[in-house]
Amino acid sequence: MATLSSAISAAASALSVERTRIEAAVSNLANAESTRSVNGQPYRRRDVVVRAEPVDSFSAALGRSTATGVKVSAVVEDQSDFRRRYEPSHPDADKNGFVSLPNVDAPQEMVDMLGAARAYQANLAAIGIIRDMVAKALELGKG
Amino acid sequence: MPLDPLTLSSATGSVLNRPKAGGGAEAGTGAGATASFGEALGRLIDGVEQSSATANTALGGMMDKTTDVHEAMIALQREELSLQLTIQIRNKLVSAYQEIMRMPI
Amino acid sequence: MNTIDDAALIEALRQQMTKSVARQVAAAGNLANVDTPNYKAVEPTFADALKGQLQMAAPRAGHINPGDASKPQMREIKDAVARRDGNTVELDRELLTMTRASGDFAQAQTALAAKFKLVRYAINESK
């Protein structure tokens, strides 16, 4: 049966995933107005693809139950259309006066970032709770 | 069949406080009494061995994370109780034996 | 049999701890996947009722009783509301579950520790 230590592993896996999501949101916000990134194109929003995964795949393969953790399967570029804004004076304006801007919706990025931060905090708290439980269990072994 | 120390210790009052039989009764049932003492002690020792094996398995499981910590700790405690009970009973049996040996025939 | 003997009580407390662990593991998995698209929050189900456990005969000596608590089935939480990405995990609910499971665990542990101490005393102090 899945033990408390696999539960801690599950919570720990979430910490790195949520951190990656925060980093992506920060990058998106920082580049929300970058009309020209390294490839000459406007910055494309970074999207973190997340997937559930058993904490111990070896045990899971053996049919033993293990806690379900999470992992980043990929960080991809959001392929939705760029925003367009009419600004003929902009150096990157096209011949019709429109500028292509990154497909970043700043308020949405803020929401995602705060959600990721909250999830990070919750998983951190979970590790503490579980660790205390293990300590309590060990006390049973004493005098 | 091994004896579980916890079941036995519920009746600990009667086991450990078994009244010393009078000389006459003891002699008459000496053989029978020895046989049942031996049998009871044998069962207790089986109980200790079994709870020790269970505890070792549980502790091993705890270390490679296949068994919960609390299961291992409970198994450890049961092993300890099993051992303590057996030692106590052995001590009582030894002192009862010495008592009997001192009795004039 | 109306009286609950030591062995049955200890077994019941052990089961309470095991069930709390199962709840904790499920909650940890849910919490870790709060942002996983389409993840459905799960909880363990236990086949037996605790009352039934107290009446059972004492387990065989040294035998770690598997009982029904060691292989809990995980089922999706009933009436869970899904967000737009299909995820049904509610952060606060999972944290509450964890706090409760932790409390139940500590309660059983304290009772067990006290019980072991009393039995040990009875064994060693009998004259």
Image (spheres, coloured by chain):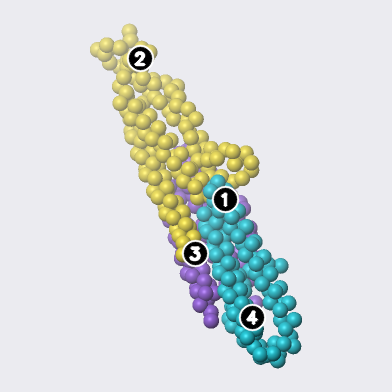
Chain colours: A yellow, B cyan, C purple
Mark identifier at residue C108: 3
Please name whichever residue, A106 or C92, is drawn nearer the observer in this view of the structure.
C92
Q: How far is mark 2 from mark 3, CA to CA?
A: 60 Å
Do pointers 4 and 3 mark residues of a single chain? no
Chain bearing mark 4: B
The residue wearing badge 4 is B97
Viewer-closest of A28 and A104 = A28
The residue tagged 2 is A38
At a point 51% along the width and 68% down the height, the residue shown is C116
In front of the other: C14 or A80: C14
Say which chain tag 2 marks. Answer: A
Q: Is residue A20 visible?
A: yes
> Quarter holding the N terminus of chain B?
bottom right
Between the residue at mark 2 and the residue at mark 4, the CA separation in whole angstroms equals: 94 Å
| x and y percentages locating residue B69 in the rendered image | 52, 54
Residue B9 falls in which quadrant of the image?
A: bottom right
Does residue A93 sit above or below C69 in this rendering?
above
Dots 2, 4 in contact, CB < 8 A? no
Q: Residue B60 — which label? A: 1
Mark 1 packing: few (<14 Cα in 10 Å), some, or many (20+)?
Answer: some
Residue that lies at the very extreme toward the top in this rendered image: A95
